[in-house]
Amino acid sequence: MSPLTKLISYLSLLLGTTITISSNHWMMAWTGLEINTLAIIPFISKSHHPRAIEATIKYFLTQATASTLVLFSSMINAQFTGQWDLTQLTHPSACLLLTVAIAMKLGLVPFHFWFPEVLQGSPMITALLLSTVMKLPPITILFLTAPSLNPTLLTTMAIASTALGGWMGLNQTQVRKILAFSSISHLGWMAIILMYSPKLTMLTFYLYSLMTTTVFLTLNTTKTLKLPTLMTSWTKTPTLNASLMLVLLSLAGLPPLTGFLPKWLIIQELAKQEMSTAAVIITMLSLLGLFFYLRLAYCSTITLPPNTTNYMKQWHTNKPSNAPIATLTSLSTLLLPLSPIIPTIT
């Protein structure tokens, strides 16, 4: 990809995200989503591998369908209420269509099928963008329309996402697919609390993005795409692998790491809303995710590399500066003491 194409695509990503998160009008929000979709496509397809082209087509068709449903939703609402404001979504059919559209854009169950396949066909940095930056505009729309949405539907989709994200990630050996199912599982935690504390949803998303960025950058540095390769990376970068283990445990939500903070606050808020049953179910289902995070952590640090391996050991790697990864790792593991100030923010 030429530098000019890369620059235009990155600027378009920034522009599309900014337009969506700062707009009040449905047409502007839709325009931002479309710009975002078109801007990420060159990054997915740049390797020209058949799997990358397949991922590009799947991504484009899914996002185009979701954008069409967003447009239908806003037009139905405008027809019956005369309102084009994002916060004035009141018609039941429009609310249902919007929930389906945003679930497709995010990869919530039952509209999750495209997400692991697209991530598997994308380069590591593109997969990072798809897991974090590309989810910000749809989650912002959910944040603005939260009071109008159906709580039963959201709770059902949230619990299903946490269950399926944990269950489907158990048997994977491809690191990008494991992180895709991790993303689906975390989206369940964000969706279940959306109706009751939208700011807590945004906090969960920010912390999830922070931890996922750290994991993707670390794996990109060690050139790890599958579990057997992860097992042999300890000899190259032991310090990086040790910090990766901590970030993975944080992503799993184990105390006293950063990832425990959003889950703790969500369970507390669900208990306040008299949804203790949902809190217990989603907490039990997160144990499925804990298993594959522990497996990744085990492979990255505790497993000794075998004497004979089919994978070329990359002893001499171009080691870039790890300062950004070091900073992100610190934030991904040490933010729990800030929890007393969270209630003043949310």
Image (cartoon, rainbow, N blue to C red):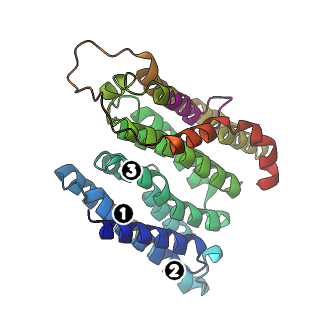
Specify whether residue 320 is painted magenta. no
Report helix, strand or loop for mark 3.
helix
In the rendered structure, are the residues bearing label 2 and label 1 in contact, judged by CB atoms less than 8 Å apart? no
- Near-viewer residue (72 or 143): 143
- Earlier in the chain: of badge 2 and badge 3, it is 2
| Residue at the disc numbered 1 | 40
Report helix, strand or loop for mark 2.
helix
Kind of residue at disc 2 = Met
Find residue 201 and report its horizontal and vertical position in percent: 64, 53
Find residue 57 and report its horizontal and vertical position in percent: 25, 60
Can residue 188 be seen here? The reply is no
Of discs 3 and 1, which sits in the foreground? 3
- Circle 3 Cα neighbour tier, 10 Å, few/some/many (<14 / 14–19 / ≥20): some
Compared across the picture, whether 213 is left or right of 202 comes to: left
Find residue 230 and report its horizontal and vertical position in percent: 36, 27
- Near-viewer residue (250 or 230): 230
| Residue at the disc numbered 2 | 28
Report helix, strand or loop for mark 1.
helix
When the figure is inspected, residue 236 is found, relative to residue 346, above or below; the finding is: above
- Earlier in the chain: of badge 3 and badge 1, it is 1
Find residue 147 and report its horizontal and vertical position in percent: 68, 64
- Circle 1 Cα neighbour tier, 10 Å, few/some/many (<14 / 14–19 / ≥20): many
- The residue that appears at 31% across and 49% down in the rendered structure is 123
Of discs 2 and 3, which sits in the foreground? 3
Residue bounds of the magenta highlight: 243-258
Q: Quadrant of the N terminus?
A: bottom left
Compared across the picture, whether 45 is left or right of 231 comes to: left
Kind of residue at disc 1 = Ile
* Mark 3 vs mark 1, CA separation in Å: 11 Å
In the rendered structure, are the residues bearing label 3 and label 1 in contact, judged by CB atoms less than 8 Å apart? no
| Residue at the disc numbered 3 | 125
Q: Quadrant of the C terminus?
A: bottom right
